[in-house]
């Protein structure tokens, strides 16, 4: 019976893929993905049928992949980061319960970004996407407030796009009702990729112009500090 | 200059390690870790000096690894899951800013567990550890309440041990002040390992006896549902 591999490829380099993800690509005859991520994997895809579509083509890609499996062909559909966080695992399982699906987890960009600036997460944390394409803005705001009140480390995904220039600024305003303006913040663009860029700063000093859709923003908890340019959240050990 | 690799090995099998993590092990002369995780990697460690210590030896292991690097030896210290979430990246950077450190991110058990029961996370989510060894219990409870109020998907780490038999039950009680007793819950033991076991159930029907320290518990949001035995949280696409 043919199988659909739903693969989290990690933040966007072959090196950050798991062995299991690489093997699943090897086992697949067809690989479906967003064109930008297909490009990243191209050296793994030489003998594959590759089907790529543009941004916002998520459901189209899912349907193409499911149809291939129904035709009896082992197929992979790729997600950046982890397939089960803002990825393809959900829509695939919503669309098809008649085929065999294996979800292969991956490294999400919060962890890839964190690794590049020290150890900013370390403790209870949450991820919040600021994209309101699929989520009511009021719910996003409510989650921001709850996360700040609970003093979670907060990793913000999709922080800023042309249509949502001020969403991050507004989120920071809500967060500062609970967290100090001196709370350390890490801003990482292209986390896990060779061309990554990063800034370690504080809540009140964010350079919003630096932030785009390929950026993850990590906001510390009340114990987070900056040492030698690294952002560190203590786990609580006596050091 | 010698380097310290702080490696998230993923949930506990070589297959779930990233290529980058495997390469960092290869580059290291010394590998330091908790004995249980060293055992998992043993086929990668044949020509290495391996230093393992028992549970709760975290700071001892960090100091040993740092000393090796100060002696000029490339060294790896391993964490299960992601090194930057409840892992070794924090204490290493707290202890040593005089050596070169590279943090290598990995797949955390929430994602590995999620992949085994469908797509239960998919949307804004948080992780909360119920271990109060290093965190005041009041803060843990406050975070549980905030996460439930914000309708986050909640991944609970360290849910239950002999000394903390009722912490998960108490957490569920707090969560049910905000979430329906019918909210889907996934319980995964040994996520990402061959011997994994899992249950998909609801908040009011958790089998607490099944849960131990090697278990991750994933509690859905208000849109999460169960279909064909899989737990699915919709991302919000029109399907």
Image: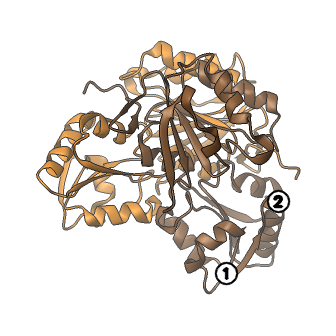
Chain colours: A orange, B brown
Using the image, name the chain to which the residue with label 1 belongs. Answer: B
Kindly identify which numbered label has been placed on residue B59: 2
Residue on which disc 1 sits: B29
Which is more toward the observer, B236 or B183? B183
User: What residue do we see at 32% from left, 62% from top?
Assistant: A24
Q: Position of residue B229 (x, y in %)?
A: 37, 39
Q: Can you say which quadrant of the picture contains the N terminus of chain A? A: bottom left
Kindly identify which numbered label has been placed on residue B105: none
Earlier residue among tags 2 and 1: 1
Which is more toward the observer, A150 or B211? B211
Q: Residues within 10 Å of mark 2 (few under 14, many from 20)?
A: some
Q: Position of residue B32 (x, y in %)?
A: 72, 71
Q: Is residue B114 left or right of residue A99?
A: right
Q: Does B171 appear above or below A28?
A: above
Which is more toward the observer, A74 or A130? A74
Using the image, name the chain to which the residue with label 2 belongs. Answer: B
């Amino acid at each position: 019976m043919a199988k659909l591999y739903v693969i989290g490829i990690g933040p966007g380099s072959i090196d950050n893929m798991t062995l299991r993800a690489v093997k699943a690509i090897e086992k697949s005859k067809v690989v479906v993905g967003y064109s930008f991520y297909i490009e990243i994997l191209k050296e793994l895809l030489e003998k594959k049928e590759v089907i790529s579509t543009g941004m916002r083509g998520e459901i189209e890609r899912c349907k193409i992949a499911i149809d291939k499996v129904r035709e009896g062909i082992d197929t992979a559909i790729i997600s950046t980061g982890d397939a089960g966080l803002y990825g393809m695992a959900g829509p695939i399982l919503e669309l098809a319960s008649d085929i065999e699906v294996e979800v292969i987890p991956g490294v999400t960009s919060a962890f890839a970004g964190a690794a590049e600036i020290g150890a900013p997460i370390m403790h209870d944390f949450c991820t919040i996407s600021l994209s309101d394409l699929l989520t009511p803005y009021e719910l996003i705001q409510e989650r921001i407030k709850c996360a700040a009140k609970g003093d979670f480390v907060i990793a913000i995904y999709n922080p800023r796009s042309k249509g949502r220039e001020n969403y991050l600024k507004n989120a920071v305003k809500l967060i500062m009702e609970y967290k100090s303006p001196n709370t350390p913040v890490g801003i990482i663009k292209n986390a896990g990729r060779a061309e990554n860029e990063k800034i370690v700063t504080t809540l009140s000093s964010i350079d919003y112009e630096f932030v785009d859709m390929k950026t993850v923003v990590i906001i510390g908890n009340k114990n987070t500090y900056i040492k030698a340019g690294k952002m560190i959240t203590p786990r609580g050990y006596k050091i």
